[in-house]
Image (cartoon, rainbow, N blue to C red):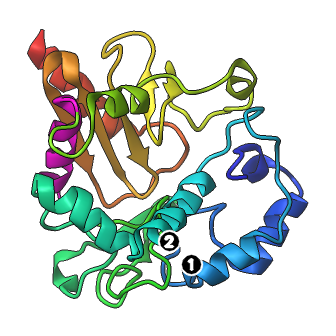
Amino acid sequence: FGMDMRMFLSATPWPIAVAEAELGLHTLGPPAPDLQPAPDEWMARFGSLPLMSQPGLSWLYNTGASIAGIALSRIGGKSLGELLDERLFAPIGMEDTAFFTHDAARLADGYRAEGGTFVTEDHASGGRWSHKPKLEDGAAGLISTVDDVLAFGRMMARGGTPVLSRDSVAEMSSDQLSSDAKESVGPLILESATWGLCQSIKTSGVGLGSYGWTGGLGTSYLVDPAHDMVVIVLTQRYFDSPRLPQAHKGLQEAAYSALA
């Protein structure tokens, strides 16, 4: 179950997308931490929906990570935010990463293009990330800083120390798609790339073997262990399409040009 890019290009709404929207799950679209129900209620509603595909036959975005986050919280007996802070953020020095902040002055307004201009999609003050959400979503919703994202990227580049095993990092950064699933990917995974565990992996060209992901609200990060390099771009402009915007591509290309 999850996002299939064809559902956004269809002339008529997909019935499964209509049913998901009526349940208020907000897993087939942009993050909506201010609208999602609490974890147990979210799972109860989600459980009323059918699968969109048999496991392994297609690749569908987003929802699997939401379910994994709820499962982690239940297994750990704590909120997902508490678990992430204990097991990941604190050990590697990610001091400013969480599902919300009380210091909204540190947030930035988010913008999207519309009719040749920009409109405010989310206000920093009183916006979606200025208060604690009912559901801490494993698929989306963390706010962070460039220093914290760099700390995460460096942890991955050095093989996971001190929070992950090298085997775990190897699995996360290697191809996890079956041949059947690759036929269903569509335009979401970036050019010349495949999918590992919650991140894309470059399969050809400059940066072969590098991995990372791009967030539709305007961010990207790229880890290249072979060159001991992490490239981070944080903007306030929402993406106009599934493709990486030129500003992000240009900065990544400049980083590789500097290496050359």
Q: Main secondary structure of the magenta part?
A: helix
Which is closer to the viewer, label 1 or label 2? 2
Give the quadrant of residue 159.
Answer: top left
Q: Position of residue 248 (x, y in %)?
A: 31, 38
Q: Looking at the image, which residue is at 56% across and 78% down?
A: 39
Give the quadrant of residue 252.
Answer: top left
Residue under numbered circle 1: 39
Whether pointer 1 and pointer 2 mark residues with C-beta atoms closer than 8 Å, the reply is yes
Q: How many marks?
A: 2
Q: Looking at the image, which residue is at 61% across and 26% down?
A: 177
Residue under numbered circle 2: 74
The span shown in magenta is: 144-159
Residue 144 can be seen, yes or no = no
* Marks 1 and 2, how far apart at CA: 10 Å
Q: Is residue 154 magenta?
A: yes
Q: Position of residue 185 (x, y in %)?
A: 67, 32
Q: Is residue 34 left or right of residue 224?
A: right
